């Protein structure tokens, strides 16, 4: 039951901390801390910096150019990076497609695509969800029909995050309508420049453009772009979903958010004293701190079990639920901390180059928007309802 | 009656797209629509007959604002309720302005809050320096609802003197285009408008004073009690709409072949949402019924209601989005806009904790 | 939307208040306030006092000797009585059996049984639940077989409250095993002295004896004891359940409990000041007060609608859920108010005639037990889960 | 190792009926069982080698008390952990008593709390008046766990002098049968024993003092930190048992023909209960790992844990009963007894609010 880091792990932690101090551009850290919008260029720049130290693909196997971090090292890296306000990596190529290619892709696909993910030549996005399908992937409708050396794709994907920046998309498509619904699904790679691919923005409730619809009309994709076998895509999709579990608790983000909230509450005044000293506010903050301290250990315990080779269990779902609830409660309390200044919202002020005076305190503008935006975290990646189904079913055996 | 008319107007002429158009306009609302609402008597419903209105009781205000909430109406009802209520304490010529407000010709805003005052109603640092024939105002007013479009501002200030205190707070009526009034308008996250207002050596005549010298805070308390009731009733209307949308979604949206409303976990959460809605409705009734009671009773019920709306309203808003899933997160779908309004009402006139503290100070229920 | 009482209603309120001041024995009020155990004699005594003013059967129709109170009058009476710490009436004869007899009983049954309920000759208990049946009444197993002029009863009832004091029990029994399960049920009245009836105590988790199992072995009951028609018992049972909704919110009990909690929190010291002045404690108390003020109005609104003849809807279930949650939160906060003195529990001290010094403050002994005991309120009379099913199904139409 | 042995002992020789028998006995526990547990080394697991034990770290205490909680063991582990920890700060002859405790021969109780002190550890009104060769103790000690069966009491008192303050609090070892010690034992709602103890002119020699004069509060903090960790771990064990029973019930109990565990509303609540259990488990690990850290770090993690157990433990206890329905309300079925223990642990060493306040005072997590 020893949860202390080993000497090697502590050394690695120091190494990452030093890297963040030295290499993370202040401009990017400030944007992250103050919830400004990151541009595509910001993301590409940060990937390149991480890649220069090998950190970008640190969790990849050595055979594919990675450092073969174990789960603990990966957790340490995530915590340090997030606590330093480093931008989160864009996960679609790095953590979602890459493991699938490593496990099921052809040698040619591995050799071509993996280096391009690492060096930033490709910016991937994800074509999983469809309108009306939600968590129920087996019901997907987008089709891929074989035509000589090509598949012809027709249909629509939705909730495609950062699709407006991507040059590639990996898609689940239906290649067979017979049999069980999950048996006719294939996994295919698509160049977004192909004629017939159209990206339409979805604007979120607070006005942000993060996600998109992607429409496919007679899009011709070479058969070499099929990953693994035809009609086996369901297996690959599940592999991807289970595999991508690192950082699901969001401990680093919660810690960074909580520390920012403390700063804000120290600055905000209530009856002539810092809001932080108000008993009700302090109580809410402290409850979150207590829960987070416990969750940090829960996360390490589960990560440790993962390191020890235990199969992924319902614990991951617990981390997802508790993690989102906690981060959302931080967003909520930060919103409250602002008092009336939570209301003003100047969208342009979130973009680089905005130079006007802030309305109210300089940290205020993005906070309420963030609170609303982060309601998504308990919805996407398997909603908290789906996670609770998993927990209870796996643990009750019902 | 007027509330029914307002309800019909909202249902028939104020669909959500129209609302978004109004909100996106330069003014942040539609002058035409406002004139129409005035014509229907909807503004007058907020004021007593003696001030030229046709209502003005707690129930009149509550019923009207429920409809405003159901339609997410962006026209400046709230600001004019606040400003008009303040002016009703004023001179005859000031009361005449209320009539112009009711007619839809004149717009008011209530410029009371200040940058570091949070929700403290007694926090007034703006000063009024007496001169031979009036006052000179200096100070900053923050998050003044509809402050950018108003013709007149109701401004609170501390009359300068020996150690000025709460009893020196006094209200003034200031034309918004007066020299020295600097306004910076901006949108709010939920689609409304507000302004930061700087007052720099603003000269006003003696008769700009509203009520008597030092009467400011007691007027402010009346204004804010009405305003708080109004936004809570507005939240109730928005909650009704959000719950209706969610119910409809649960009935029509299918997953794994069945409507998601068949899932018991959602059913039970929905049951709690509907129960809390009834609690809020009761809170609105209690507050409306005590609006003209003693200040202690009034404030107890107002604060109880605001705390309840802050707590349960947030729960309902968040659950409404959550039960919709991804679609609830989009601008295009209405539920998110209702959720934004419900939650942001927590930031008007004091949040859950502010009102809980006030309830504790006021002691047990009357 | 006017919720103020009329002049008549206010006069009635005064009348009841004066009655309670004059006629409610201090000994009984003290027992109720301090959560001491009521004996059978206490209950019978209180019924007789109420009956002397006609209040016991105030809600009965005039034709059966009542005062024909409407729902508002009944609410006023309940609130005043409970606020004065009057013992609650024993409902089984008065509010459960009586309405069924009035609606479905024979004239002979009405003439014989109703006066005996009013004057205390009969002490009724209820034979509804069976082991393993819970909320699912249609699955009941206890049988009644016709044998000449008698039915012969065999089976078991459970959760029979105050069965140890009762001389009569009304039972749902199965008279037909064919057809739909709810079609073969009958409603029958049984004398507890009949050979073959055996009452066995069920001890609750905190040590109280309130409920019982009642076993029936070849119990011969005259056919005249059947209420209404054979095999129509399901209809009568539903009538009973829907009819007995007055006071379901428990507003009076909550008000009395909250005012007692205030007294306790004024007496308890924390850091040299009354606990009532502690901000966290005050916050919890105030939230309950806020919810209760709203629920009082919710209750009146629904009662008013009932008065106006609207059919009972899911609102009753809302009152049940919210009412139990609120009262349980008062029990919980009262327990917390005691600090370490919540722990001691001397069961004998709850009985009359116990004369030893109390352990700690004199109000402390029953509080924790009450907290545990009242967990039952969200379970019995249709659990809060069943109520939430009703609310959502009726309002969603699903 | 010892924890495994404790676990086996509980599973094999301590079914719930045996537990109830022990609790109902005159002493409130079984002397024979206690001797057997001593024999197995279970008491020694709570103390360091230097005090004659075989454990004594945070993890030793936590693992042992988890098993105690799983079995709802009524034998006086807690009182002897408290008393023994205090004596470990004492003289050699006092430490010898710890060995007798470990052997199961001698029983201790920790008589610190007082009637109006609530959870305040510094609230000591009992006095120790210096005499030529010792002290005379006077005062009242309240809710002393296992105080009725103890052979020795560890008593805190304020040494009389000029304006005595917290720095005069000192601990004394007092034989329980000493003249002037009046004990009134009684059961607790969850099936354990405690006592009110009045000290009337109790004469003790100078060497009855534990540690140095004025060292009392610092020893009390050490004792209470260990005790708090212990009862939280005990709560975790009881939570495990309550959840296991509930899971089993959900799988076997049928309603309308299906196991009630198929109802999604119950499934989702169960998922939250299981998640909170993991959080409590993590809290126990954090507190156990910081038991010998600086006082500030130790107390932060101890208070965080106690707050978490108070909040989530209550939820789990209440939900376990609720999901069982009527059967969960009965004495005969075990779940109610687990629920009682989990909830009543909130009343030992400070409740949710006490520890939240302490966390606020201590500042952010170390």
Image (tube, coloured by chain):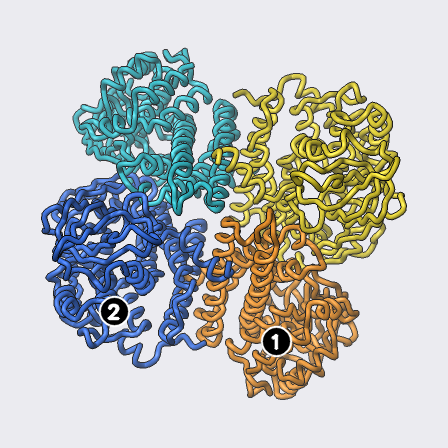
Chain colours: A blue, B cyan, C yellow, D orange
Determine which residue is flagged by label 1: D81
Which of the two residues, A168 or D57, is positioned nearer the viewer here? A168
Relative vertical location of residue B26 with respect to residue D228 in this rendering, above or below: above
**Which chain hosts label 2?**
A
Residue A106 quadrant: bottom left
Relative vertical location of residue A309 with respect to residue B353 in this rendering, above or below: below
| Residue D68 locus on image (x, y percent) | 61, 72
- Observer-side mark, 1 or 2, equals 2
3D distance between C-alphas at marks 1 and 2: 54 Å
The numbered mark at residue D199 is none
Residue A248 appears left or right of D34: left
Residue A173 visible to the viewer? yes
| Residue C209 locus on image (x, y percent) | 77, 51
Residue C174 appears left or right of A68: right
**Which chain hosts label 1?**
D
Which of the two residues, D162 or D145, is positioned nearer the viewer here? D145
Which of the two residues, D203 or A6, is positioned nearer the viewer here? A6
Q: Local crowd at mark 1 within 10 Å, few (<14), some, or many (≥20)?
A: many
The numbered mark at residue A103 is 2
């Amino acid at each position: 039951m020893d949860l202390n880091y080993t000497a090697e792990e502590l050394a690695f932690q120091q190494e990452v901390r030093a890297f963040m101090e030295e290499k993370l551009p202040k401009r990017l850290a400030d944007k992250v801390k103050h919830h400004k919008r990151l541009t595509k260029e910001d993301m590409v720049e940060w990937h390149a910096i991480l890649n220069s130290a090998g950190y970008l693909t640190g969790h990849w196997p050595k055979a594919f150019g990675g450092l073969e971090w174990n789960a603990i090292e990966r957790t340490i890296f995530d915590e340090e990076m997030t606590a330093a306000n480093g931008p989160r990596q864009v996960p679609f190529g790095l953590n979602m497609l890459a493991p699938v290619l490593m496990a099921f892709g052809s040698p040619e696909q591995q050799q071509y695509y993996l280096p391009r993910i690492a060096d930033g030549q490709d910016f991937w996005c994800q074509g999983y969800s469809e309108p009306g399908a939600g968590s129920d992937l087996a019901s997907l409708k987008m089709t891929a029909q074989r035509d000589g050396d090509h598949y012809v794709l027709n249909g629509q994907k939705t909730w495609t995050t950062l699709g407006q920046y991507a040059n590639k998309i990996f898609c689940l498509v239906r290649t067979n309508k017979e049999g069980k619904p999950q048996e006719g699904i294939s996994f295919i790679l698509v160049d977004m420049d192909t004629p017939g691919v159209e990206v339409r923005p979805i604007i979120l409730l607070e006005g942000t453009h993060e996600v998109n619809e992607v429409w496919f009309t007679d899009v011709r994709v070479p058969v070499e772009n099929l990953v693994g076998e035809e009609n086996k895509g369901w297996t690959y999709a599940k592999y991807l979903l289970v595999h991508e579990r690192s950082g699901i608790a969001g401990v680093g983000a919660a810690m960074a958010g909580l520390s920012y909230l403390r700063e804000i509450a120290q600055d905000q005044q209530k009856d002539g004293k810092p809001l932080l000293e108000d008993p009700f506010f302090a109580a809410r903050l402290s409850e979150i701190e207590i829960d987070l301290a416990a969750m940090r250990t829960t996360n390490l315990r589960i990560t440790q079990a993962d390191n020890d080779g235990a199969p992924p269990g319902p614990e991951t779902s617990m981390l997802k639920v508790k993690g989102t609830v906690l981060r959302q409660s931080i967003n909520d309390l930060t919103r409250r901390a602002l008092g009336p200044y939570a209301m003003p919202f100047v969208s342009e002020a979130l973009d680089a180059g905005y130079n006007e005076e802030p309305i109210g305190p300089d940290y205020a503008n993005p906070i309420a928007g963030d609170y609303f935006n982060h309601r998504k975290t308990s919805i996407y990646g398997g909603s908290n309802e789906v996670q609770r189904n998993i927990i209870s079913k796996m643990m009750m055996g019902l | 009656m007027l509330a029914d008319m307002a309800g019909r107007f909202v249902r028939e002429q104020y669909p959500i797209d129209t609302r978004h158009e109004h909100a996106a306009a330069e003014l942040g609302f539609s002058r035409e629509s406002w004139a129409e609402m005035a014509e229907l008597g909807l503004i007058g419903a907020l004021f007593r007959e003696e001030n030229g209105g046709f209502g003005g009781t707690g129930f009149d205000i509550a019923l009207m604002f429920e409809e405003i909430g159901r339609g997410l109406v962006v026209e400046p009802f709230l600001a004019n309720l606040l400003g008009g209520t303040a002016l009703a304490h004023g001179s005859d010529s000031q009361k005449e302005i209320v009539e112009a407000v009711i007619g839809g010709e004149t717009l008011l805003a209530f410029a009371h809050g200040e940058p570091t005052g949070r929700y403290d109603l007694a926090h007034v640092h703006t000063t009024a320096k007496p001169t031979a024939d009036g006052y000179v105002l200096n100070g900053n007013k923050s998050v003044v609802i509809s402050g950018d479009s108003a013709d007149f501002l109701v401004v609170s200030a501390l009359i300068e003197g020996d150690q000025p205190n709460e009893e020196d707070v006094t209200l003034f009526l200031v034309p918004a285009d007066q020299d020295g009034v600097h306004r910076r308008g901006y949108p709010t996250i939920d689609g409304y408008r507000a302004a930061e207002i700087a007052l720099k050596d603003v000269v006003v005549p003696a008769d700009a004073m509203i009520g008597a010298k030092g009467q400011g805070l007691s007027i402010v308390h009346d204004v804010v009690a009405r305003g708080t009731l109004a936004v809570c009733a507005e939240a109730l209307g928005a909650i009704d709409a959000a719950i209706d949308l969610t119910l409809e979604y649960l009935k029509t949206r299918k997953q794994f072949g069945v409507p998601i409303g068949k899932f018991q976990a959602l059913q039970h959460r929905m049951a709690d949402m509907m129960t809390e809605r009834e609690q809020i409705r009761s809170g609105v009734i209690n507050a409306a019924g005590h609006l003209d009671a003693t200040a202690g009773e009034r404030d107890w019920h107002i604060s109880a209601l605001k705390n309840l709306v802050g707590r349960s309203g947030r729960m309902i808003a968040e659950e409404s989005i959550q039960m919709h899933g991804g679609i609830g997160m989009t601008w295009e779908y209405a539920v998110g806009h209702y959720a934004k309004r419900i939650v942001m009402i927590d930031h008007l006139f004091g949040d859950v904790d502010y009102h809980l503290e006030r309830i504790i100070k006021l002691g047990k229920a009357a």
